[in-house]
Image: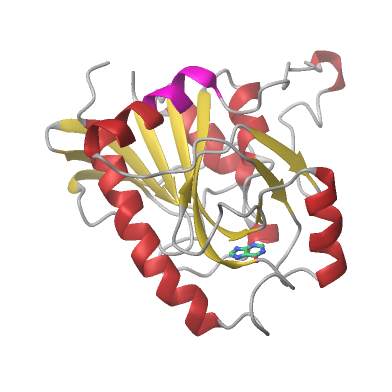
Amino acid sequence: MTLAIIGGTGLTQLEELRIIGRQTLHTPFGSPSAEYLFGDINGTQLIFLARHGNPHRIPPHKINYRANIWGLKQLGVTDVIGVAAVGGIGEHMQPAQIAVPEQLIDYTYGREHSFFADNLEHVTHIDFTDPYTPALRNRIIQAADNAGLEICRFGTYGCTQGPRLETRAEIKRMAQDGCDLVGMTGMPEAALARELDMAYANISVVANWAAGLGDGEITMAEIEKNLQIGMTKATELLKAIAVLPV
Ligand code: HPA
C-alpha cells in the first residue's frame, strides 16, 4: 500500500511528516495544487499534497482536482485520504469533531469532474454506490480506536460549490436530503480517485455549525479556533493510521 494524504484548510503542512523528498509534476490535465511531499511518519512512508496550494491560495472551485489525483496515480499511490474542513449539520457533528463519512451528495457544478470527459470513446461508468472505500474507512476507524480517539464513524457529506458559505434554507434542504456534513472540496476528488482505481476515504474536521444551526453569523475566527483543535486530533489520527500494519 502506498498512502497519500491530501490536506485541506487547516492542514497545509503536516508537521509530523519528516520530509525526505519533493516533486513537482505536470499532468495532461495541468498542474497539481502544489509539489508532492514524500516523507515518513514514525517510519511509514507517505505522500502529502496541500489541496489549496502552499501557501493556501486556491479556492475550492478552482482546485485542479484532476491534476492532483492524476499526479498521485503517477507516483504509484494506491490509497488516498482526503482531509477536509466542514460545517456540521447532524447533531453529532459539533465543532472540532472528527468524522469519517460513509456517503456523499454532490451539489457542485461546473467543475472538471471526470478523466473521461474528453475521450468519449473510453467512457467508464464507475460504480459509486459506496463512494468511500470501505476497507480504507475501516482502517481509519481501527486506527482511531487504537489511539483512543473519539470520532464519528458515519455520516453523509454534502459537497457545495463555494466559496461562499450556504444560506439557512440551503442547509435546511441539505439536512432534509440526509446530509450530516457540508464541505466544498470532497467532490470531484472522491470520484476521480475511483476512476483511477485508487482507494479513497475522507476525514472531515468540523469547523463550525452550518448556516442557521449555530448562534448568529459564522466567523473566520470561530472557524480557525475549531480547526486548530480539530486538526490536532486529525494529525493524531493520521499518525495512528500510518503505524497500523497493512
Ligand atoms: N460550509 C461549507 N464548507 C465549509 C463550512 C461550511 O459551513 N465550514 C468549513 N467548510
Q: Residue 150: in sight, yes or no?
A: yes
Residue occupying the far left of the picture: 43
Residue 230: which quarter of the image? bottom left
Count up the numbered dots: 0
Instruction: Report the residue at 44% width, 42% height from top.
Output: 25
Most common secondary structure along the magenta stretch: helix
Residue 41, position in %: x, y? Answer: 18, 40
Query: Does residue 244 sit above or below 58 in this rendering?
Result: above
Q: Specify the quadrant that holds the N terminus.
A: top left
Horizontally, residue 7 falls left or right of residue 181, namely left
Is residue 228 highlighted in magenta? no
- What span is in magenta? 133-139
Horizontally, residue 151 falls left or right of residue 119, namely left
Dividing the image into four equal quarters, which quarter contains ligand 1?
bottom right
Residue 44, position in %: x, y? Answer: 19, 30
Query: Does residue 35 sit above or below 191 in this rendering?
Result: below
- Report the colour scheme: secondary structure
Query: Does residue 77 sit above or below 42 in this rendering?
Result: above
Instruction: Report the residue at 55% width, 33% height from top.
Output: 70
Horizontally, residue 188 falls left or right of residue 241, namely right
Q: Nearer the viewer, residue 43 or 205?
A: 205
Q: Nearer the viewer, residue 246 or 63?
A: 246
Residue 27, position in %: x, y? Answer: 55, 38
Q: Residue 108: in sight, yes or no?
A: no
Residue occupying the far front of the picture: 91
Residue 172: which quarter of the image? bottom right
Residue 30, position in %: x, y? Answer: 61, 46
Q: Specify the quadrant that holds the C terminus.
A: top left
Instruction: Report the residue at 45% width, 75% height from top.
Output: 224
Horizontally, residue 105 falls left or right of residue 134, namely right
Q: Nearer the viewer, residue 205 or 78?
A: 205
